[in-house]
Structure formats: structure tokens, C-alpha cells
Image (spheres, rainbow, N blue to C red):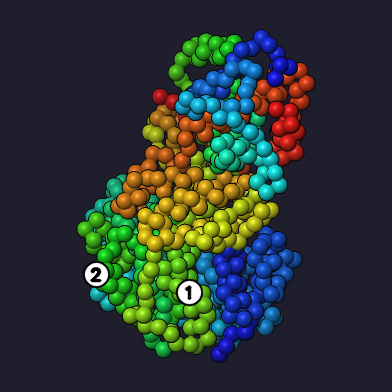
Amino acid sequence: MNDEKPEIKKLYALSSENRRFTFSLPLKNTIRIGKRSYAVTLKSDEKFGTYILLKNRKYPVEVVRSRQNRYEILFNDISYTFTIETPFSLKRLKVLRSYSGKAESEVIKAPMPGKIIDVLVREGAAVLRGEPLLILEAMKMQNEIQSPVNGHITRVMAKSGTNVMKDDVLIEIKVG
Amino acid sequence: MKIKRLLIANRGEIAVRIISTAREMKIETVVVRNANEPDAMYVSLADIVFDNTEDPEEIPVFLNIGRLIEIAIETKCDAVHPGYGFLAENAYFAQKCIENKIIFIGPSPDAIYKMGNKTIARELAMKQGIPMATGSRGNIGNEEEAAAAAELIGYPVIIKAASGGGGRGMRIVRKPEELEKMFLIASKEAEKAFNDPSVFIEKYIENPKHIEFQILGDTKGNIVHLGERECSIQRKHQKLLEEAPSSALDDNLRELMGSMAVRMARAVGYYSAGTVEFLLDSDRNFYFMEMNTRIQVEHPVTEMITGIDLIEQQIRVASGEALAFRQKDVRIKGWSIECRINAEDVQAGFAPDPGKIEKLVLPSDPYVRTDTGVRAGSAIVSSYDSMIAKLIITGTDRKDAIRKCKLALDKVWIKGVKTTLPFFRMLVRNPVFIDGTFTTAFIEKQLDKYYLNSEYEEMLAAWLATRLFVDENLRRDSISIDYENGKEMSPWLLNKRINQF
């Protein structure tokens, strides 16, 4: 891997839950579990599609989405979202975060295409984690969409009786 | 009368399941090909395919009684098997079949009607002296009646659709101030799902186990039960995992509940396969919930521990044969667990995740039976349920079955949609599941995470993301790929990269 640009020594994969995984460059095709290092191989064939081979076990993998430095990876049927940061961009990110304070926003998107049956909250309302926000009907089920956080409703885009597409923004909540 | 040709008024895995037994019995099968999934697996397995893809389908064909009868007549079928869902518990459909001299494989229209109407079923159960949760007398007409009934019964209460089933039109109410809203939601949902807005109110049994008994009866008046299934692993009242027998029952309780189930069936002159559902509370009191007058999704676990093919029995009974065994002949051997592998996103509260199944590899070990209606290349379409496959694992006892289940789950390989596999991988390692003390509240109350993943799995995913980033951005010869054009990266792109690593 000596064709990689030499000035960056490390990369960080930041998970959406803010866990940080550090990888040295040039990036090796091995992974450390406990005290030992294991070879990681990315493979693909007709029967299984793409997979990672580790310790003789196959794990299904898929890149669901990628945009700039953001990657959504499906690994063994679980999705993970990472942003890849360099030491410089990580520092900048920390500075940016300290300016913006704690007021983060949570955006509730439609998890699947369907019809809004009922909107249970209004703008300005305080909600608790787990509190039902709206009812979305899809695939013969009425699905209660619950608040993932404690906070205040800042915007309600969902309208009762309308159809929505997957990932349409329904509600915005100011966390805290 | 011997059945020679059978119309399967259903799709998916149950159509495939019925075809396999019909074939062994040398009965020809007819299925309906429809525009939602013209290339479905069941279509390729039947002897005769009725092509309905040109039909505009104002009503989905599997719900269109007139059309199905026409198809049965046109294809010269002498019987119809409704499977589960759709018209399986529609008394009018059963009646129409009989009027057209077509055998309906299921109980009498009268039994379907009485058990389908929860208010009538409750009255029947009460007359038979079968234990039940206290409830409203008949249906509830408006919010005021609902409030009065709930007050009398005492909170928490559950509002249920009179014509309901499968968890739809059910709402639990814990506080009087929630009642009006929940009553309206339940009623609306009931009207939409069952064309009948009537609901009734029952005392809500806290944290029960869901125990159901498989019933089998013939037209000569013989009725037996084939033991219980436990289906307490549910979310939103939808079952995810079922097992037989249940660790909550001993022989005495099994005999008592089984005899009550038979009594309930006898009260409506039941024949064919049916299921009597009970709730079992922590003091081992049981309460009649409802009777399902069809073959159930989870019927295979009973088949595995009794050695009885329930579809075959349904067909034999429908042909007028008497049951070849009695209660004393029914033997339960081993332990069987069914995992419903659905196209659902466990990380998004089990939201359906329809799509094309790119790859599908199912285990072929002798302890696993897989009932499926799809194969690689099939689609899980949003017009139907999200089932991909039922993984049925049988062991000598519960411990053995769980151990084998763990192995089997790691052998299932599905690509293209997210599945419930990570949920089951977590479940079979959960101490509450392993000791068998879980209740229907388990998923919603006792789990803080719905899936299994280890720290090193996340690290591997992070490694892959980093690998891709390096490849795209830090190499002099890096190739840029437009991911936005597809949900998934096509394998050849990744292959190209693999060669570069």
C-alpha cells in the first residue's frame, strides 16, 4: 500500500453513536481482537455475494450508502454508519461541536413507505423517549413511531391521511 | 369423496407447503398467478397455474370470493384450501364453496362464523364453563359505553375488534383519560381491517404467556388435541417465535387446558384443524382468548413433535375420512422451535423492509426444516406480509433445540433485505429466553436491544468503511464510484476493488 498519500498517519471511523475506531495508515488487512491479529479478507462469489472472511467464518457485508466521508455498512445483517475522519478533520469537528453547544436535533424519518394515520404530537410539545409520535400504516400494520429522545417538538411535517415515502422527514425534535 | 384437484387460494410459503403434501397424496394442485409477484416460487411448483396477471384486481384476488369460485370452477377443482390469512376465516367464502359443490378444506361456515365473532365466541365459552377474562357484555357502541364498561371491569383493559385476529384492532388502555382516543383508534382499525367497527372490552391480563392448543376433528364427531404451542415471543401482538411443547405446562395443566380446548371445539361441532388460544398468568390461571379456525403459521412445530402432517389431516377430514387415531394415541416427542425470518429491520422497531432477495442460503441439516415461499431472486413485495422463511428446529429437549437453533441461525444467509436474524441470534442467548420464564411483554419490556452484535463486528464494519475511504480518497489511482445510483453496490464493483486491495 505504498501508493497511499504519505502525510496522513491515522484514520478514525466515528460511529453514529460516537464510538471511535482508530486505524493506522497504510491500512492493513488485519484486525486486532484481544491480543491477537487476524487476517481480514473481502471476497465475493456467486452463491454468497460479498462477504468478509475472518477466522474461517463468512460475514455478509454490503455498502448500503456512501456519501463523501460517510458510509452505511451492512455487516452480518446489522447496519452501521461511520464517518471517516483524518486527525485534522477530527480536530475541526471537535471545535465545531463545542461551538454548537448541546442543542442537537433529532429528525424522525419514515422508516418505510406508508400512510400517516394519526399525528399524536404538536409543535412545541415536550416528549419523552418512547412516547408515541405518530401512527404510520404500512404492510398491513399500524406502526407507532416513537420518540427516540427526550426533547421538544420543533417541527411537524407529517399530516394525517397523507402518504409518505421511505425517509420522508416527519417530525423534528430538539434534544434535551 | 376423494379429492383429485385442489385450488390453493393463497400464496407464499403456505401455498408451497400445501403443494408438497398434496403431491404426496397424489392430488393435483392449482394456484393463481397474480401481477404482484408473477414469478413467485409457488407458481413454479404447482401442477396447474391459473394466470390472473391480466386481471385489474380491484380487490386482490386472494380476497375476491367471486373470482376464486370462478377460477375453481374453470380449472375443475373439487376442493379449495384457503391456507392462512386472506379468506381462511371467512364463513361466507366457505359457504360459497359448498354452494358451488366445491369442498372447503376447513371447518363448517357456522363454526367459522361463531368463532370469528369474538362476542359470540365469548358467550359460547362462558356457557361451556371455560375460564375467561372479565369483559364487556357484547359490543361497545360509543365512547361513553366504553368508559362505563372499562370502569366496571377495572383498568388496565384491552379493546379488541369483535371480528379481529392477528393483533389488529387491539389497544391496551391503562388510564381512563386514554380510553376515548384508543377506542376510536381500535374501532377505526377494526373497520378498515375487518369491515366491522365493533369492539369489546376485556380485562387486560398483565404479562401472560400465550399458550395455544392444536385441535383436530373429523366430521364423525371425533376431536383430539395435539398438545400446546407457546407463542409468547411477540411484538405488536405478532408472533416471532413459537415452540412446542411449552416449558410452562406440566402434564396435569396440559390435560386440563387440552380438555377445555376440545370442549370449546365440540361446542361448535368443529372439524378440520383449529387452534384454541389461551393466556396463562403467573399463577397458572388460564383464560380463553379465541379460536382460530384455520391452519396456523406455526403449525410445523406441532407436526415435528407429534409426527402428524396437519395439512394431510385437513385434506383427509375434508374428504370425509374419520381420524385414524384417538387422544390416547397422540404422543409428544422432542422439542421444536420455529423462528420467523421476516424481511424486517430490527434496528428500526421491526419495520418491514421489502425488496429483492439477492442471495438466499438455508441450512440443510437434518434437525432443521425450512418452510419458505421464496428463493434467491424472489421479491418480498409490500402488498403482502414480510415472511421470508420459517426455520423449524427440532431437538430432543428444549436445551438441545436451543443449541441447534443457535447453529442453524448462523447458517442462514440472506442478502438484499434486512431480516429478523439478528433478533433471533440475540434471543437464543438471552437468559430469560433460555430459562423459559418470558411472557408476551418480553420484547417490549425486558429487552433494551433487539439484536445481537459483538464489538468486534462493529470494528470489522468500521474497518470496511475505512478500507473503502482509503481506496476512494487516498490512492493516486483511486476510482470514483457513484453509489447514489443504487441502494447496493453491485458485486462486480466490489470485485474490482477486492483485486486492488
Q: Residues within 10 Å of mark 1 (few under 14, many from 20)?
A: many
Q: Earlier in the sequence, mark 2 or mark 1?
A: 2
Residue at the (36%, 80%) spot, across then down: B329
The residue nearer to you, when weighing A99 against B194, is A99
Circle on res. B170: none
Q: What amino acid type is highlighted by mark number 2?
A: Asn
Q: Residues within 10 Å of mark 2 (few under 14, many from 20)?
A: few
Is B420 placed left or right of B217 in the picture? right
The residue nearer to you, when weighing B39 against B123, is B39
Residue at the (37%, 60%) spot, across then down: B397
Pointer 1 chain: B
Pointer 2 chain: B
Q: Is residue A75 at all visible to an observer of this figure?
A: no
Q: What amino acid type is highlighted by mark number 1?
A: Leu
Quadrant of the frame with the C terminus of chain B: top right
Residue at the (52%, 61%) spot, across then down: B366
Residue at the (50%, 31%) spot, across then down: B456
| Residue A170 placement: quadrant | top right
Is B13 placed left or right of B146 in the picture? right
Mark 2, residue position: B252
Quadrant of the frame with the N terminus of chain B: bottom right
Query: Circle 1 sits in a helix, a strand or a loop, which is it?
Result: helix
Query: Circle 2 sits in a helix, a strand or a loop, which is it?
Result: helix
- Alpha carbon separation for disc pair 2 and 1: 25 Å
Q: Residue B495 at what x, y percent from top left?
A: 73, 36
Mark 1, residue position: B310
Relative vertical location of residue B319 with respect to residue B399 in this rendering, above or below: below
